[in-house]
Structures are given as structure tokens and as C-alpha cells.
Amino acid sequence: MPALIEVRELVRRYQLGGQEVRALDGVSLTIEAGEFVAIMGQSGSGKSTLMNVLGCLDNPSSGQFLIDGQDVSAFGPDELAQLRRERFGFIFQRYHLLPHLDARGNAALPSVYAGLADAERQQRAESLLTRLGLQERMHHRPNELSGGQQQRVSIARALMNGGQIILADEPTGALDSASGAELLALLKELNAAGHTIILVTHDAHVAAHARRVIELRDGHIVRDGGTPDAHQAASNESAPRGQGGWWSRKRAQWREALMSAWQSLKGNRLRTALSMLGISIGIAAVVSIMALTTAARSSIEKDVGGFLSGRIVFWRGNPNLPPGVPPQPFRPTELEALRALPGVRAVTSERETQMTARHAGRDSMVAVLGAEPHSLQMRKLKVVEGRAFAPVDFATSAHVVVLDEKARDNLFKKGEKVVGRTVLLAPGLDPQQAAAQIPGSPPPPVGVALPVTVIGLVAQDTGSMVQFGNGLGQVFMPHTAYSKKLDLRPDADVFNVLMDFSLPPAEVRKQVVYRLRALHGIEDFGSWSGEEEFQSFQQVTGALSLLFAGVGAISLLVGGVGVMNIMLVSVSERTREIGIRMAVGARQADVRLQFLVEAVLLCCLGGLVGVALSGLGAVALNAAQDKLHVEVSGAALALAFAVSSLVGLVFGTVPARRAAALSPVDALARE
Ligand code: ADP
Ligand code: MG
């Protein structure tokens, strides 16, 4: 049966200012299971170095090192971590407890990395602490415990995963003599229970408690008192060794990483808040772009994308016409020809004429329009008083009109009810307002003075970006009544092309313009297409999004660098904690995870603040205006979370790797 520990010609060199120090200079020894060995020697003789090598915290420069006959020299970091986790329990002179964990948390730490289930872990920690007389101190933090109590917590920690081999480096060094004596008694008890004890001390009185004393001087063994005694351990008490399955191990790792990340962020509130700032601004920018573009899009869709989508409006007249050239109206044959063009679903026409309207002695020039059933809707006019046209109005050519607000203001007193009133429509131009007429439009019908009943009042929908009309008040009348009573021309002044979307809108518009120009011999008309408007608006919002995205990206970059910086500080501040975690068996991956989780958590908190900022911005914006309704959507939240996590992952990688790459012994030595 191989010895528990066997080393041959162990050498550990240090490079000190160009000079080589041999802390261990050819040490050979064998330790059997169940021994109680004291390693003695003066300060600087190499005791700690030997203990660190034996405990797999440090690598020898050369020599052989076997545990249970297994050559450890070839082991990688994770295999060494496993050995520390499963075989060793460390007791340090300065206890090395984690300050933010209570006694139970500190004692239980090794089993987190072994993957013991939560309940079992706590139960075991509690029973160990109780055995060590700390049942009243379970929830005390190290700074609330005496030195002797802290050292007993560290013994509980050493025993947590079994502690087959207990390595104690000057364990009584910081204790008063009574506590020191108690501790030695405890170690003896543990040895009697089957634990192998390796005790490092410079004190001969302490060493006297061991059954075998090895003395070091200048890295050599100068005395090895007593042959390895054959005290064979009646194997250790049952030690839980990662019985938790893969799942419970992962859960324990993640929980520990989250808890410690949270503790660390909470412990440095101001620092955390400041380093979140860049991320918050970046995320606020990103979320705001999303909310704004979504709001703008839906507003435009409501506006032009709804009723107007798939529609091109043509009207008679063009400001670029040479003077003296009258714009021609659109003749039925021409409209018929346009209907045949590809991409055109239908063509609907409207006519209008300028007349004088009269009510209670007030006269005003108005544009009277022969309205189709959809005309009000198409102009984004909504009824604010009375009603819109009903089918029966068209069927019976009813003498009813709907006024817009301008016509109402010109004809009625302020606050006067308009619905049910009669207005007289008469031909003839007010000379002052004649200039407002489209040049060349047909003379108003002569000899007609038509009484009409007002059935409704319409107003421009505030959300609309499109405004029809030439500045005159508008009076809408069913097109059937209009053509019978006011304007007997079959020609139209306005027509709509409804598209079937087999061709792009711009293409259809080009074709109609081309054909109409050919028919008229000149471009004496104008046109407007909701689709194209939509597209040009999208270009504007696209540019705006780009700007916001730029601001967002830069803030995230700056924020990410800030997070990286703060995480590097955090790693160097917590180097000793990393060393402690490694000593109790944390793998490099565990340490990496811990710092990555902290970086991601930090970024996600920043992201959350950013989302809250943009939410507040949205509320303020919605209160200030009603054109856009801005909302922070679930998709924006998900994006914020994803982006924050990504920034955390990217910028947390370097600090996390740096932490994981620390050597346990260097990390522990750092103050
Ligand atoms: P002891 O624990 O017996 O006091 P150590 O094992 O700590 O002694 O140190 C042995 C020798 O190795 C000392 O001369 C010390 O200066 C040197 N030494 C220990 N650690 C380092 C290190 N990290 N770098 C350089 N020299 C070291
Ligand atoms: Mg030492």
C-alpha cells in the first residue's frame, strides 16, 4: 500500500532580485495516513513553503510528489483544486475567513465547490460548528468572533469536505496561550479520529504535541524524529464528497457566484453606482431609440399607413406652370385610361368649386367639395360635432353639408351651435379673395343659391401630418348632390389612385404622372403619395436612430471599459479572498464565474437604471405632447437585458481571467 504522501528531492526556488533563493532544497519524506507530524524550524527555514507544496497550493520547481502513489507533479490546476477540495483542510495562522460570511457560511464554503446540496451543506456546517462549541455563534461574522473562535470556524471549514489531511500553518501563532492549548487538544482529538495532521510551527512546545517532529533548516531536513508510526487510521468519518449531482453542483456554484457578486456590489455602493453610469446612459439611448422609432412608426402607420396607404392623390394645378396656362381638369376618359395602368386597382374622383357661403349675414369664400364616402377619412378629418355622411345622403342627393373648423369660424359666432343650421351657398367671388382661387378654375355656377343643412363639423386629426386644402374653409357635400346642383361638369379636380401593390408605389406614381402628362401635354397637376411620404419619413427616423445608436454604442463602450476597470480593482482588492476560495477547492472556472457574474450583474443593474430612465423619459414625452405615444416595450426590455449582459461578458472577461489565473499561494500571501 503506497504512503499517503511521499516526496522525493523536492526543490522550490524563488527568484529574488536576480538571486536564486532555494526555499526547499532537496526535501524527501514520507507521511503515512493517520500520522501527527510537526514541521519545525526557524523563521525562513522553508516550513510554509513545504506546507504549501504538500497542500497543492504551490508547485515545486523540481522533485517528485506522490499522493496515494499518484504523481501530482503532472496535475493541472483543476486536478489540484480537486485534491485540495477532497483531501485537504487548511488552518492558517491568520484564520483566513471571508469577512462577509457568517460562521456557518465560512465553514460551509468548501462544500459549495464540492456541490453538496444546500440543506445538507448547512446541516453539516452546523453540526461541525456545534461539535466545536460554536452553536451560539453560527450567524456571527468573523469580526464578531474572538481569535480562538475564528480558528475553530476555520477547523470546521477544514473538516467540511472530510479533511483527510489537515495542514495547519502556525495555527496557534495568533492565539493567546489558553486558546492555543485548546486548539492543540482539538488537533489531537482529530488525529485520534483518524485525520492526518501536519502542523507547522517554530515553537518547540507546540511541536512537542506531535508524535513525529521534522526539523527544517535552510530548506533541508535536519532531523526527522521518529519513524513513521504505523498508526493506521480507522478511516475517517464519513465525509461527503460532492455527492450532489451535476445539477446540484451547478446550482451551488451559481448561487455562490451570485451571492458573492451581490455582496461585493452592495459593499461598494457608490463605486457600483458610478461604474453603472455609462451602461445606464448607453442602455437608455438604445431603449429610447427603440421606443421612439416604434412610436413614430405606429403614428405614421396610423396616419398615412392606415387609410392613405395604397393611395396616391392627384390634384389639378401646379405652381410651376407658366403664367396664363390654365390647369386642365381631369376628364372621365383620362381617368378611364389611368385605370388600365398596371398596379392600379381603382381611380376615384372628387370635384370642388369655390363659392360664397352665407349665414346670418356673414359671407365667406369656401371650397365646396363633392365628397365621396371616404373623402373625410382620407383627409384625416374627424367629426367633432354632429355626424358624417350616411349612405342615404349619397343615395338621396341630400342637401346637407359638413363644415371644417375654418368654415365654421368664418360663418358662425364663437361658441354658436352649427349642427342643424342652414347655410346658403351662392356663386360669385369675393374680390379680395379671388386671388386665392386656383388660376383657371372654372367659374362658379351662375344663378344658383342653394340652401343646405349643416349636419356635422370636422376637425383635422391632431396626429395627421398631411393637410389638404388651399387655405379656404371647406364645405363637404355628397358628390351626388354636388354634381346635380352645383357643378354639372363631369370633370374632376382631385382624384385618387388606389394601388394593388403589384408594383412599388413610386413606380405606379411615375406611370400615372407620365400618362397624364402625355394626355394633358403638360404637367399641370400635382400629386402626393402616402407611401413615399412614409418612406422619406423613415429615412429621417433612420438617421435619428443611427445617431442614437452611435451615442448608445459609445456610452456602452465607455461604460464597459469603466466596468472592466472597476472589476480589475475588485480582483486586486479581493485577491486574498480568491486565494481562500482556491485553498478550499474552488476551480479556476468557479473563480472566473464569480467575477463574470459580478460584471454581468453590475451591467444589468446599470441596464435596469437605463431602462427606468428611458421609461421616465417616455412618460415625460407623452405628457408633453400627443402626436407620439412612446412606450418601453417588452422587446426593448429584453434587448436592454441582452445588451447589458453582453457588455458584462465582454468587459468582465479580462478581470475574470486574471482572477482565475492567480496562483493560490500568491493570492493567499497578498495582503
Ligand atoms: P518559514 O515559513 O519557515 O518562515 P518560508 O517557507 O516562508 O519560511 O520561506 C522560506 C524562504 O523562502 C525564505 O527565505 C523566504 O524569504 C523565501 N520565500 C518564501 N516565499 C517567497 C516568495 N514568494 N518569493 C521569494 N522568496 C520567498
Ligand atoms: Mg511560515
Image: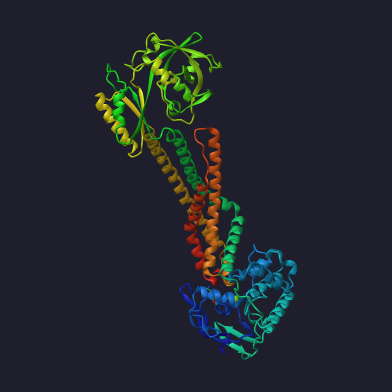
Indicate the quadrant where residue 90 lies. Answer: bottom right
The x and y percentages for residue 603 are 53, 53
The x and y percentages for residue 193 are 69, 82
The x and y percentages for residue 667 are 55, 68
In the picture, measured across the screen, residue 123 lies left or right of residue 414, that is right
Q: Specify whether residue 504 is in view.
A: yes
Q: Which of 217 and 64 is in front in this view?
A: 64
Q: Give me the residue at 53% from left, 75% from top.
A: 80
The x and y percentages for residue 499 are 36, 35
302 versus 124 height, above or below: above
The N terminus: image quadrant: bottom right
Q: Specify whether residue 669 is in view.
A: no
382 versus 5 height, above or below: above
Q: Which of 185 and 429 is in front in this view?
A: 429
Q: Could you tell me how many numbered marks the image carries?
A: 0
Q: Which quarter holds ligand 1? A: bottom right
Q: Which of 129 and 153 is in front in this view?
A: 129
**Coloring basis for residues:** rainbow
In the picture, measured across the screen, residue 630 lies left or right of residue 351, that is right
Indicate the quadrant where residue 317 lies. Answer: top left
The C terminus: image quadrant: bottom right
Q: Give me the residue at 60% from left, 53% from top.
A: 269
Indicate the quadrant where residue 262 lies. Answer: bottom right
Q: Which of 35 and 343 is in front in this view?
A: 343
177 versus 493 height, above or below: below
Q: Give me the residue at 43% from left, 36% from top.
A: 305
